[in-house]
């Protein structure tokens, strides 16, 4: 099932980073097609438990039939709440793959892809109200420019936002309609890369991905046992910067937080260096090309 739905990225390295032990509890924060969860289960003993999160109804259909496995149909930003609900105080390892699944990209009705005609949707949670269509058609020009610059790191964000607003009151309802509107600002020879960044920006706003990631990382220090492992795969610089800074500094700033005595308030230490896919994995799965894996261990001090 998982190979049809999504090909898991950095599978062995990310799961090995959890340092799986007997009679332990693990979390797959981004279940998707279940590839990482299946690998975790294959490395667990019969006394261990795995909890997985996914708010996407399509992903929930991939639930694994295993008595050690529990699928929580929620956003992983609610990590701490649902661990408490399931009477789990601390866990031994947490894995998160922050990428959009191949299934989501390849399903036109979801509106994630620049390649297919479909509704401007982009919702991970199909029950929520906000869609990419609403953003494109109702956000102010300045708000559009801000999100395009922040999430897509597009230098011409103001020009793109202005072009979108100029096409109102004609509604932009589909991906192909949006692509047509944007055509005149797409540089020749680099159209797809810029268009992908625009779609990325809209998707991140629809799903509040940066807010969710910040909340998840902050909660991870409370949920992980001392010595527990955090294994996170990111796909663009903004996400990776947040993961790197939280591991190194205990916050999302460029400098560590400090206590009243001037000592750094740190929660993690990194395990090894940055891990990226090798040429063979990229050859087999081109969507892995931008993946970056960071692994960290919960420190024994600063226990919450």
Image: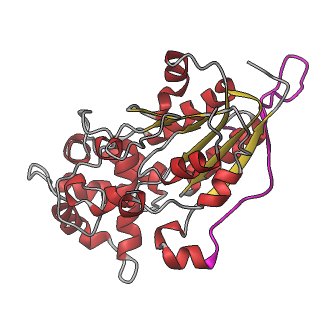
Q: Give the dominant element type of the magenta stretch: helix, strand or loop.
A: loop
Report if residue 254 is visible in the image.
Answer: no
Q: Is residue 24 above or below residue 222?
A: below
| Outermost front residue | 46
Q: Which residues are magenta?
A: 252-279
**Residue 97 pos. (x, y %):** 53, 50
**Residue 26 pos. (x, y %):** 61, 36
Left or right of 125 on screen, residue 118:
left
Pick the residue in front: 229 or 197: 229
Q: Quadrant for residue 75, please give it.
A: top left
Pick the residue in front: 253 or 34: 34
**Residue 35 pos. (x, y %):** 49, 54
| Outermost left residue | 170
Report if residue 100 is visible in the image.
Answer: yes
Pick the residue in front: 260 or 280: 280
Residue drawn at (57%, 45%), measured in percent from left and top?
A: 41
Pick the residue in front: 44 or 20: 44
Left or right of 285 on screen, residue 159:
left
**How many labels sit on residues?**
0
Residue 188 located within the stretch drawn in magenta: no
Q: Quadrant for residue 223, please give it.
A: top right
Q: Is residue 101 above or below residue 79?
A: below
Residue drawn at (52%, 50%), measured in percent from left and top?
A: 38
Q: Is residue 92 above or below residue 151?
A: above
Q: Is residue 68 above or below residue 84?
A: below
**Residue 162 pos. (x, y %):** 28, 55
Q: Quadrant of the C terminus?
A: top right
Left or right of 211 on screen, residue 182:
left
């Amino acid at each position: 099932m998982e190979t049809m739905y999504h090909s898991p990225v950095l599978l062995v390295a990310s799961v090995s980073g959890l340092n799986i032990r007997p009679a332990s509890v693990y979390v797959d924060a981004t279940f998707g097609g279940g590839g990482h969860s299946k690998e975790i289960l294959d490395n667990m003993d019969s006394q261990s438990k795995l909890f997985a999160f996914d708010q996407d109804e399509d992903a929930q259909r991939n639930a694994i039939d295993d008595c050690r496995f529990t699928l929580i149909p929620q956003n992983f930003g609610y990590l701490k709440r649902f661990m408490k609900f399931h009477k789990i105080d601390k866990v031994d390892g947490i894995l998160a793959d922050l990428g959009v699944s191949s299934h989501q990209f390849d399903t036109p009705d979801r509106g994630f892809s620049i390649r297919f005609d479909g509704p401007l949707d982009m919702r991970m949670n199909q029950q929520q109200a906000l869609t990419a269509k609403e953003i494109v058609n109702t956000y102010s020009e300045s708000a559009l420019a801000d999100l395009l610059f922040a999430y897509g790191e597009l230098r011409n964000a103001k020009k793109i936002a202005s072009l979108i607003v100029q096409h109102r009151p004609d509604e932009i309802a589909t991906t192909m309609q949006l692509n047509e509107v944007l055509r005149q600002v797409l540089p020749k020879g680099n159209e797809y890369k810029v268009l992908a960044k625009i779609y990325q920006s809209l998707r991140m706003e629809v799903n509040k991905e940066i807010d969710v990631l910040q909340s998840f990382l902050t909660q991870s220090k409370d949920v992980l046992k001392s010595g527990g492992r955090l294994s996170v795969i990111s796909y663009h610089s903004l996400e990776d910067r947040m993961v790197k800074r939280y591991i190194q500094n205990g916050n999302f700033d460029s400098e560590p937080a400090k206590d009243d005595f001037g000592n750094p308030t740190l929660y993690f230490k990194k395990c090894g260096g940055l891990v990226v896919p090798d040429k063979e994995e990229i050859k087999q799965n081109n969507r892995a090309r931008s993946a970056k894996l960071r692994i960290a261990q919960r420190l024994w001090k600063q226990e919450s």
